[in-house]
Amino acid sequence: MARHDRTHQYDYVVVGAGSAGCVLAARLSQDPGVRVLLLEAGPRDWHPFIHMPAGLSKLVNRKDVNWDYSTAPEPGLRGRRLWWPRGRVLGGSSSINAMCYIRGVPADYDAWAAAGATGWHWDAVLPWFRRSEGNTRGADALHGGDGPLTVSDLRHVNPLSEAFIEAAAQAGYPRNDDFNGPRQAGVGLYQVTQRDGARCSAAVAYLHPARARPNLEVVTGALAHRVTFSGACADGVGYSVGRRRVHARATREVLLCGGAVNSPQLLMLSGIGPADHLRQHGIEVLHDAPGVGANLQDHLDICTLYRATKRVTYDRASELRIAFDYYLRGRRGAGTSNIAEAGGFVRSALAPDARADIQFHFVPAMLDDHGRNRLPGDGFTLHACFLRPRSRGRIALASANPSDPPRIQPRYLSDPEGFDLRMMVECARLSRDILTRPAFAPWRGAPLFPDREDLDDAGLAAFVRAKAESVYHPAGTCRMGGDELAVVDPQLRVRGVERLRVVDASVMPTLPGGNTNAPVIMIAERAADLIARSRG
């Protein structure tokens, strides 16, 4: 290992100030006798576009707050490289996402426990969801009312979002005003992680209130190079800030919270991973762990777009007027929109069990290539993703240089039975069915993507291969469990070494049925308790 200019000592070193890292830093530093260091590769979350919810559309091309990853060429998607935005800023992806608050369903977590993640069944995780949640509707048996993460109803709703709900009802889907309530299935408006009309990221909810504590140090612009070890015990993290090299010593534990891409990358850079792969990059093997980087899952998403006949969309809305209303009129108007205002969960005819297997996000604007390709005129978009993909990919190293992005190989649509492709065709078919319902008649213009309404299954399959994209939910690359390929045990401790845990979406055995931010915060809440209990 390279020599470091400085060494500092802490009880805990947390790598990554995303959703999980912010929770851990805040919860662990509640004990004044514990010293915590939180490292973040990106900057402070100072930019106003982060905090104005509708500003998320302006964050798309801001590489200063985004890792700006792209996948390797995807064989199942015509060799395309898909864009994978991941937050690189205090708050991580919770500072750049669409703020939809979704947990999944009880059966998702019961499946985790059945697969070897003992203690992560629904009845065990519900208290940690409730602890984190501050729902403005108040507390009940399923919701928390005074947790740090504020969950609110939308302050502004576009009329096209209401049209989507009506159209989906015409298609036979029930209305649902709480996707985290007794049932998930149905359509309605999303509740969002917002507080008084502003984004409530994990940094806002957890980290900012804790920043003044003398036992918590936060370092931004800090790129982690590797976890250091004394024998098999993790004893710190080597990182750099600019050209300055630093070693932070951890007397209790090192906690990796980099997410499904960065946590397996850092483990491999530290000598924990598939031995042959590490040797190929000249990395000394500390522990041969074939499961590191494997089991990569993501929700693949297909967008159906129509032109709009009336100028009610957000495509050509006055950005100056939106900002004026937001900042000078008490956080009101379109500036409070999360853009993906409405959506829902449906159970398709192909569903293997009772759970909804398709999720919709409706956007009153035309989104092509994640909004990076701005289309002229006005229109609307319906995202649809298959919630339980069977395809599995891998995160691999591109080099031993921590500054180089890892190789992201999702292997979408690669399951041998072809079930994922059939489900994505179903996503596209159901999207078209909803958007052609009478409720959209006053607004609907010509179809844009696909540009025909008469495509058969083969045509829809070709459309999926040509246009499907990530909906930003990578998970599973440091899977927890009890088998030989599990990277962490159910206490999130890395198997084969000591005093090292992973706490983020990478530990999920399988994707939950929905957006992943709320489950990651739950995982971190429970992890903070496990860590506190372990030190007695």
Image (cartoon, rainbow, N blue to C red):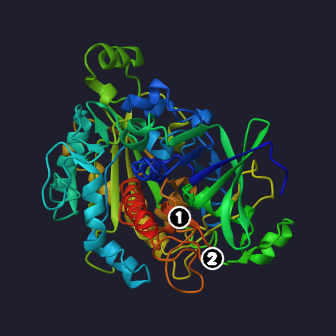
For residue 291, the mark is: 2
Decide if residue 94 is on the left or right side of residue 469.
left
Query: Toward the viewer: 344 or 506?
Result: 506
User: Looking at the picture, which amino acid does disc 1 mark?
Assistant: Ser
Quadrant holding the C terminus: bottom left
**Within 10 angstroms of label 1, few (less than 14), some, or many (20 or more) residues?**
many
The residue that disc 1 covers is: 506
CB-based contact (under 8 Å), mark 1 and mark 2: no
SS at mark 1?
Answer: helix
Answer with the quarter of the image where residue 64 lies.
top right
Q: Residue at x 25, y 23 (%)?
A: 332
What x and y, as percent, mark residue 529?
Answer: 38, 63
Decide if residue 389 is on the left or right side of residue 355.
right
Query: Toward the viewer: 9 or 445?
Result: 9
Residue 283 higher or lower than 250, as above or below: below
Q: Residue at x 22, y 34 (%)?
A: 159
What x and y, as percent, mark residue 121?
Answer: 32, 76
Q: Residue at x 43, y 29 (%)?
A: 55
For residue 395, the mark is: none
Residue 369 higher or lower than 504, as above or below: above
Residue 95 higher or lower than 482, as above or below: above
Decide if residue 189 is on the left or right side of residue 398.
left
Tell me which label, 1 or 2, sits earlier in the chain. 2
User: Looking at the picture, which amino acid does disc 2 mark?
Assistant: Gly
Quadrant holding the N terminus: bottom right
Decide if residue 329 is on the left or right side of residue 486.
left
